[in-house]
Amino acid sequence: MAATATATRPGTGRPDAPPEGTWLIDPARAVVAFAGRSSFLAPTISARFAEVSGTVEVGTEHSVRVEVDVTSLTTGCRAYDEVISTFDPFDAAHFPAAVYRSTGVSWTEDGAVIDGTLTLRGVTRTVSLTASYDVGRHADRMLVRAAGSIDREAFGIRFDVPGVGKLVPRVLRLEIDVDVVRL
């Protein structure tokens, strides 16, 4: 670990890691999304998953686990959502959830570097995230934001729909923006 939960940043009084404990994701205040563009002239394609759960552990063993229901995907555009639901790029019948599990968390002055694996469509790949956090006034809630990139084709996600496939970029930015509550 780059820092321990008791180390303090010089001059700030803020610890390099959040307060120790088990933190549960508040599903009502959680967003897992991805975005990207296939070319300079193409529009930015983005979508989010509405159903998110998981935990953040801070202590001698730091860990992060985030799970999404892939059927809760929405682009915010009914027409796009209907097209996506007809060809089901996530094969939700066989793989209803996507899960990110950390394999290592290193706290830094600016947040954390999180190494882990993402399992999506039955395929597990290494994904590294950079994260930031803000602890609430009473230290009972915390906002955690993490981001990284994924290659959708490495997970077998294809968009073989005429007129749509070329708009969806191969590399997407994964964003996890969650409020967690200390148990």
Image: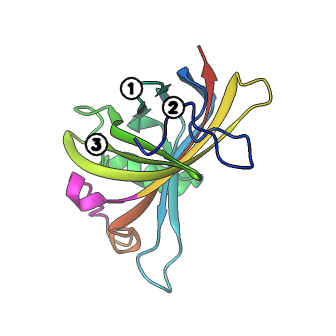
Quarter of the image where one finds residue 90: top left
**Quadrant in which residue 2 is drawn:** top left
| 83 inside magenta stretch | no
Decide which of tag 3 and tag 2 comes sooner along the chain: 2
- State the residue at coordinates (64%, 46%): 9
Looking at the picture, which amino acid does disc 2 mark? Glu
Q: Secondary structure at mark 3?
A: strand
Q: Marks 3/2: CA distance?
A: 19 Å
Image point 52% across, 59% down: which residue? 46
Image check: 63 left or right of 10?
left
Task: Return the residue at label 2.
Answer: 51
Q: Quadrant of residue 172?
A: bottom left
Residue range (magenta): 149-161
> Do the CB atoms of the residues marked 2 and 1 lie less than 8 Å apart?
no
Q: Is residue 77 left or right of residue 164?
A: right
What kind of element bears circle 2?
loop
Asked if residue 53 is positioned above or below residue 108 in the image, the reply reads above
Quick one: label 3, few (<14), some, or many (20+) residues within 10 Å?
Answer: some
> Which residue is denoted by mark 1 in the rendering?
61
Q: Which residue is mark 3?
A: 117
